[in-house]
Image (spheres, rainbow, N blue to C red):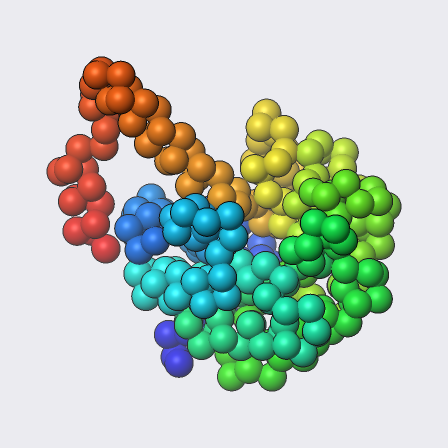
Amino acid sequence: MINQMARAARFRALHERPEPLLLPNPWDAGTARLLAGLGFEAVATTSLAVANVLGRTRAGRQDVLDNCRVICEATSLPVNADLENGFADEPGEAAKMIEDACACGAVGASIEDATGDPRSPIYDFGLAVERVQAAVEVARGLPVPPVLTARAENLLYGVAGLDDTIRRLQAFEAAGADVLYAPGLRTLDEMRAVVSSVGKPVNVVMGFADPAITLEQLAEIGVRRVSIGGALNRLALRSFLDGARQMREGRFGFVTEMASISELHQAFARL
């Protein structure tokens, strides 16, 4: 409990400084430890990477929690849990996922307004706000209250536009969310519009944004947290596929690009 309290305090403090928090997304114990060894100050789980590792299009509730526990146990860094929509529509049921993630060791958690149903991909405004309210109530009642991130997902699904995103984030802020997050922001102007419209820290995910944007530029417009979602996992899988295709064709040039065993052993031994 003391260790989790210390992690939680550290995670909150990382959101309060002017310098943006870089929040990379490992998908297992090894990648979590490698990121810790590189000097990152916190990490976040990614449900997309969990699904990829399992060979599915979507991870299940227990898959996400099991992965969260593995990553929390692999490193002493604060861990933020990607909990999708809580794997439930009803606000109270979805909010239970936050309690379960914190029981796994997480000190941050997110809840989103994507339904998981392609026929109606985003919850109606009122229900989306009720879900955040329920999540806030659960989070604040835990022995170690997590940093709660509320996500407006409409840009990813082409539902409404930036004005609706801002309206939702403002409502999530009023409901008590600690961090606000709108995946799908692509330009600095869009990010600036969101940051200037709310008073809580904003997370920007660079997996969907213009890759020419720099951390310095994000800091200048007031972004407080920068994540990458499943991008590192997808990058690793791209390298895997490229190497496997070469091997299938009878070529083995990819072996010159491998991380050495000694490099990996040295990285793991430091932790």
In the rendering, at what x and y percent does residue 149 appear? 63, 61
Q: Quadrant of residue 74?
A: bottom left
Which of the two residues, 58 or 178, is positioned nearer the viewer here?
58
What residue sits 69% from the left and 58% below the top?
Answer: 115
Quadrant placement of the N terminus: bottom left
In the rendering, at what x and y percent does residue 15 appear? 58, 57
**Can you say whether 244 is above or below 164 in the image?**
above
The answer to whether residue 91 is left or right of residue 239 is right
In the rendering, at what x and y percent does residue 47 appear? 50, 54
Quadrant placement of the C terminus: bottom left
**Can you say whether 24 is above or below 236 in the image?**
below
What residue sits 67% from the left and 78% below the top?
Answer: 92
Q: Is residue 240 visible?
A: yes
**Can you say whether 171 is above or below 214 in the image?**
below
Which of the two residues, 16 or 90, is positioned nearer the viewer here?
90
What residue sits 49% from the left and 75% below the top?
Answer: 100
**Can you say whether 111 is above or below 98 in the image?**
above
The answer to whether residue 163 is left or right of residue 12 is right
In the rendering, at what x and y percent does residue 198 appear? 78, 54
Which residue occupies the extreme left position in the image?
A: 262
What residue sits 22% from the left and 45% below the top?
Answer: 267
